[in-house]
Image: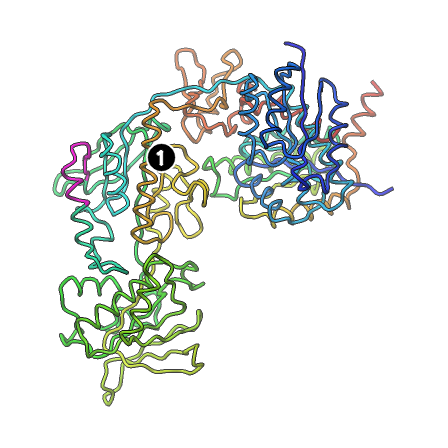
Amino acid sequence: MSYEPKIVGFLCNWCSYTGADLAGTSRIQYPANVRIIRVMCSARIDPTFVMDALAQGADGVLICGCHPGDCHYSEGNYKAMRRFPLLKNLLKSYGIEDDRVRQAWVSASEGQRFADIVGDMTERVRALGPSRVHSTLLADQRER
Amino acid sequence: MDELKIGVYVCNCGTNIAHIVNAEGVKEAAAALPDVVIARSYRYMCSNPGQEMIVKDIQELGLNRVVVAACSPRMHERTFRNACKTGGLNPYLFEMANIREQCSWVHADKLAATEKAKALTHGAVNRVRHHEPLDSLTAEMCPSTLVLGGGIAGMTAALELAMAGHPVYLVEKADHLGGNLARVDSTAPYLDSARDLLTERITHLRENPDISIMLNSQLKSLSGFIGNFSATIETNGGPNPPERKVIPVGNVVVATGYKEFDASRITHYGYGKLPDVITSFEFEQMMRAGRIQTKSGKPPQYVAIIHCVGSRNQEFHGYCSRVCCMTALKYANEIKSALPDSYVSDVYIDMHAFGKGCEDFYKKSSEIKTLFLMYGKNESPVIRKAGPNDDCGMLIEVDEKLSGERIEIPADLVILMVGMEARPDAGEVARLVNISADKDGWFIESHPKLDPVATTTDGIYIAGTCAAPKDIPDSVAQARAAAGRILAKIAKGKIEIDGVFAEINEDRCSGCRMCNELCPYSAIEFYADKKRSHVIPAACKACGACVAACPSGAIKGRHFTDQQIYAQIEGVLA
């Protein structure tokens, strides 16, 4: 059976969410695998959101914010950027593949870039196959 | 908590959504979710009947949560929040699912798009359960305005505000008012005197008791928020040490203008080496002095005007500087009337004659026998010194596009139409007032078409050429628009502050002060006596950086709470 990965995208309101909207108004096509959740700033994205999304069954998580130097809140994206390697380390220690969680910068004028990122990520996550986080957690719960 | 009653409305947006997403299917899936008491699908939810449907359901079915699956919340969130309000529901008890921009418009696979729309709607329903009624706050609006820049835009904004009887601080870096306009002789296309325009403005400014003109002054810092800014201005008073003054202002107009392109950066024009190659500003000086002459003091026989110096060129600036074409024609006219026997060549890429009266002016300039030569965007003319046998000082080689030939023209005086560029301190100004600049250094407006003078920071407006190259009428219009926006706010007296901000649970706060440092708006203060941090709601812009960072989980980001986001994650993945 073919597998359709589920990707949760956390997008900042000012650049990336607007960029994703622009992909829409420009009718740029990309895979329907991404489900977008809007936050005001990429700095709001608590690493536990990413962990939670994986635990709830996401096969991949995408974090998007304004380009460095262009944050609506001056430097929120730098905070997100600094937080990200720590999250990556944690994910690695859990054995979660690198390609499953990605951080990217998308400005309000980059509809095409957003579509390209989603397309690329969908293919990478598809290649990895379904994430085992959710099923492992379910199995753990059953054992208890 | 009262029993939850959620209403879900799936918009078809004509066929924009419904031609890809099975709206009926989304509606039915939503109807099956817990706490959903009504789910409807309708042709245009944003239409009056669509909104009335929501109002009626709130009143008749006692809905206490509303979800609309439609376009982007950036489009119609406010519309539906207002509908909720009309129905008697707190507008924050509403959530949108974006099934148009982020679904039907970007996917062709109907099945996958419908599944995604169901998931997004499920996420919204999950999220809205945890929404809380929020009230907006009010704060006082200080009626004083700070205007940065004493050029035509800044002066106009200051006058407009002061004529309505409100105090204005007009801060200018130089020791005189007028900005770049003070360096110009006359203006295109009607050839009226720049000095007259300035004198009119400056006289009125000086007569107005509500305007404090601060020359030799600069903004050093700006703190606070709309209606309640505190600006520190530094004035350099000659031999005395600089003086600092702190002034309270409600709004700020940034009108810091432009600087001209440095022509010596284009080496093949020989600016700075060939004495009779001058910039447009140097020619203005000549006009003001009333003598058009070469360095040797003789009137030139041949004058060449070169357009797009530093503009429309990938190496320097890609954009058009907008005013140079008409200024060049102005020069052609002025030279011909001062020196009727001279020959004027106008070397251009394209003639941009878009403003009122400009096309007629172009036509008129052709009739006075100006020689127009067209060059290609990346084939700049080359200027060299003429030989002893030539009857002119310089020779200009142009790959003329219309004839397809390489043409050599004589010149005794070459005028380079230098373009506009962002001032070198534009980045510093942007940082001080917390606005953004684009890749070229021009300040970014809130919306390029619908909101061209506001910025993404409330209370900060931009006018004139600091936002992009523009001519005097456009600068004046923008300055008046900015003043108009501010006057409307002052007239209202109070400002409404969105109910979305962060709040700290003092019982949980450990007083570590990590959030104090993180906040870009200094909106978190520390109560030393209680050893607790506290958010100043009016200063908070709700970015949520502190919420995610608090090690004690003591900070709640209203309307973007952990609970709401977790619920949404669960919903979109269900």
Quadrant of the image occupied by residue A24: top right
Q: Where is residue B508 in the image (x, y as percent from the top left)?
A: 53, 14
Left or right: residue B538 versus residue B254 is: right
Residue drawn at x 31%, y 31% as measured from the top left: B487
Disc 1 secondary structure class = helix
Name the residue that disc number 1 marks: B485
* Type of amino acid under label 1: Arg
Q: Which of A99 and B331 is in front in this view?
A: B331
Where residue B128 appears, as percent x and y from the top left, is 63, 22
Extent of the magenta region: B201-214
State the image quarter where residue B328 is shown: bottom left
Q: Is residue B208 found inside the magenta-colored segment of the image? A: yes
Can residue B501 be found in the magenta stretch?
no
The single residue placed furthest to the right in the displayed view is: A1
What quarter of the picture does the N terminus of chain B occupy? top right
Rendered position, B79 above or below B214: above
Image-based side of B375 in relation to B212, left or right: right
Give whichever of B148, B47 is nearer the camera. B47
Label 1 resides on the chain identified as B
Residue B522 spot, x, y in % from top left: 40, 27
Residue B74 lies left or right of residue B300; in this view the side is right
Q: How many marks overall?
A: 1
Residue under the point 37% across and 82% down: B407
User: Measured along the vertical axis of the image, is residue B158 above or below residue B510?
Assistant: below
Q: Residue furthest left?
A: B239
Compared across the picture, whether B1 is left or right of B413 comes to: right
Figure check: B392 above or below B87? below
Colouring of the image: rainbow
Q: Crowding near pointer 1: few (<14 within 10 Å), some, many (20+)?
A: some
